[in-house]
Amino acid sequence: MSTIVPQPVTISGARFEETSTTALFAVGEACEDSWGGKWKYVQAQGALSINSVGKVDNDGQLIPCTTTVSGAEPTMIGIPQVAFADNAYGWVFVGPGGGVGSGIKVLALTLCATNVKLYTTATAAPDCAVDDTATDLIAGLTLCTTNAAGGTVATECFAATTMCTNCQD
């Protein structure tokens, strides 16, 4: 079954699967997709792989997100659906939205289960990933299928709300 990636509906010219070396929109600007999902326009502060987990700062900077990074303060989470080079500009999925058939994916560690809470990991950039072993909760995020494959795999996901960490304390 092929997936259909949602298209932007609130900002003309937004492309969720492309990055640029120059800003094409205001950093921090928000956009909604054709399925009701929310996206933020960011600038990467470090390279991130496609579907990795990033911290979105208040000023629209995207930082590779590990448990160490997310545990320091309440953190908005963004999941790029394209690889980001250091200092590149582009859109990241911040939720809510996604789900079965949406094409929205996140890197998940081996045997990470479906329909459970997901957490940040120590997996370093550029492949920051999620797992179902409790560390720093990513509120609202779950996988649509279990990652039964070996290794870290891009797995379709659903966000019930805007994703954030360190907000449950």
Image (tube, helix red, strand yellow):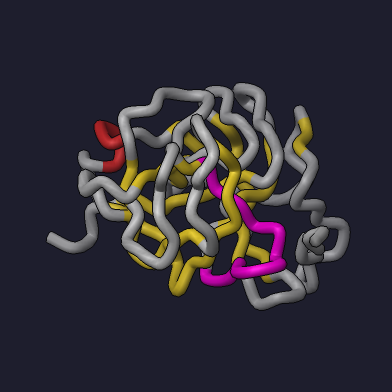
Q: Which residues fall within the magenta stretch?
A: 96-107
Q: Residue furthest left?
A: 169
Q: Is residue 86 visible?
A: yes
For the image, the number of numbered tags is: 0
Q: Is residue 107 left or right of residue 4?
A: left
Q: Nearer the viewer, residue 66 or 99?
A: 99
Where residue 142 sits, quadrant-wise, is bottom left
User: Which percent across, then down, holds residue 150?
Assistant: 51, 32
Q: Nearer the viewer, residue 68 or 61?
A: 68
| Viewport quadrant of the C terminus | bottom left
Q: Residue at x 50, y 30 (%)?
A: 151
| Viewport quadrant of the N terminus | bottom right
The verdict on residue 105 being magenta is yes
The verdict on residue 126 being magenta is no
Q: Is residue 97 left or right of residue 56?
A: right
Q: Residue at x 41, y 67 (%)?
A: 115
Q: Residue at x 67, y 46 (%)?
A: 81
Q: Is residue 61 visible?
A: no
User: Which percent across, then down, holds residue 33?
Assistant: 72, 69
User: Which percent across, then down, holds residue 31?
Assistant: 67, 65
Up-down relation of residue 52 to residue 7 (above or below): above
Q: Residue at x 53, y 24 (%)?
A: 126
Up-down relation of residue 47 to residue 156 (above or below): above
Q: Is residue 33 left or right of residue 98?
A: right
User: Which percent across, then down, holds residue 8?
Assistant: 78, 66
Where residue 44 sits, quadrant-wise, is top right
